Image: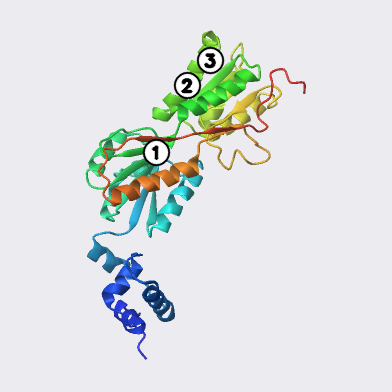
Amino acid sequence: MSMRPPTIRDVADRAGVSKSLVSLVLRGSGQVRPDKREAVLRAVRELGYRPNAAARSLSEQRTRTVGVLLNDLRNPWFVEMLDGLNSLLHDNGLHMLLADSRLNRRSGQDPAGPFLDLRVDGLVVVGTLPDPAALAAVAERLPVVVAGAREPLLPGVDVVANDDEHGARLVTEHLVGLGHRRIAHVAGYGRVGELRRRAFEATLREHGLGDGIVVEPSDMTEEGGYRSTVRLLSRAERPTAVFAVNDIAAVGALSAAEESGLRVPRDLSVVGYDNTSIARLRHVWLTTVDNASHEVGRRAARCLLDRFAGSGTPGGVRLAAPTLEIRGSTAPLGLPG
């Protein structure tokens, strides 16, 4: 008995159809009659046939894979975004390959190099890259979508993100509405960090609080958030509320408050951004901005699929609307404890 794997010819013979019709069914073509499609799929199941991905990529000039370049695997904000991205890619017969650009940079590699070597059909860049201009050369060779960041604005590159300015405004309005007047911002870097900081400052000015604006830079990590908050809490007039650029930095802020003997939210209100799984942990229960990660992921996948279908648009920015998730880390100023 032969142990060779079944071929497309075997499937065609079993179903009583041509090889080309089997190929149409396997590609999901809508041009096949339902009875013929069912006969082919039944033969595939009975024979245990698996398409030869390598041979198919040679014949189609496509690998049916999408490279996903993450800014930093340690930050969990992108998990739901990847879920939204992958669900739509999977529905369209595409697979994700992940790489961490931070690790690639430390080893001296071109972050997108391995994906080009693997001949991926497209690239999704997740988060803020230190050198976004490096994507220009990649974008000339294959479709590129940036998700969750606001740069780069390159020809033919789609940018899909949440509206950072609106999200930061929601946070600042919330804290002002609770009676806080000394509100500090643990800021981030890149275009996202800049947009959140500027909206924070503009909203305070609109409420007549422009003279007391306090911004402490950070690197958007837990350690960075901790160090920045330690500096803020050592000020002569310490803030009564801290808006951190992301949830991870906000966790660092919570640690700094606890070390200083302050209780959250009685003595200090803390807000994050991203609505990560960490913010939803019961003992953290962080007020934060839901940045519509899942929707951003689906929109990024849709942009890529449109590019594959031959959309010749010049690229642009598409923003999803964020919402404020109020939990247990914020309270009215002077709340009795």
Q: Secondary structure at mark 2?
A: helix
Dot placed on the residue nearer the N-terminal end, 3 or 2:
2
Dot 3 lies on which element? helix
Label disc, if present, on residue 101 of the rendered structure: none
Residue 78 showing in the rendered view: no
Local crowd size for mark 3, using a 10 Å CA cut-off: few (<14), some (14–19), many (≥20): many
Q: Position of residue 320 (x, y in %)?
A: 46, 36
Residue corresponding to mark 2: 199
Instruction: Determine whether, in the image, residue 115 is placed left or right of residue 224.
Output: left
Residues at marks 2 and 1 touching, judged by CB atoms closer than 8 Å: no
Relative side of 42 to 286, left or right: left
User: Where residue 262 appears, x then y in whole percent?
Assistant: 69, 24
**Residue 160 numbered tag:** 1
Asked if 22 appears above or below 187 in the picture, the reply is below
From this view, report whether residue 24 is shown above or below residue 311: below
Which quarter of the image is occupied by the C terminus?
A: top right
What's the residue at 53%, 22% (across, down)?
A: 185
Q: From this view, report whether residue 273 is shown above or below residue 173.
A: below
Q: CA distance from mark 3 to mark 1?
A: 27 Å
Circle nearer the N terminus (3, 1): 1
What amino acid is found at the position of numbered circle 2 in the picture? Ala
Badge 2 crowding class, 10 Å Cα cut-off, few under 14, some 14 to 19, many 20 or more, is many
Q: Position of residue 291 (x, y in %)?
A: 50, 36
x 29%, y 47%: residue: 307
User: Do we see residue 194 in this rendering?
Assistant: yes
Give above or below for 37 relative to 166.
below
| Disc ID at residue 204 | 3
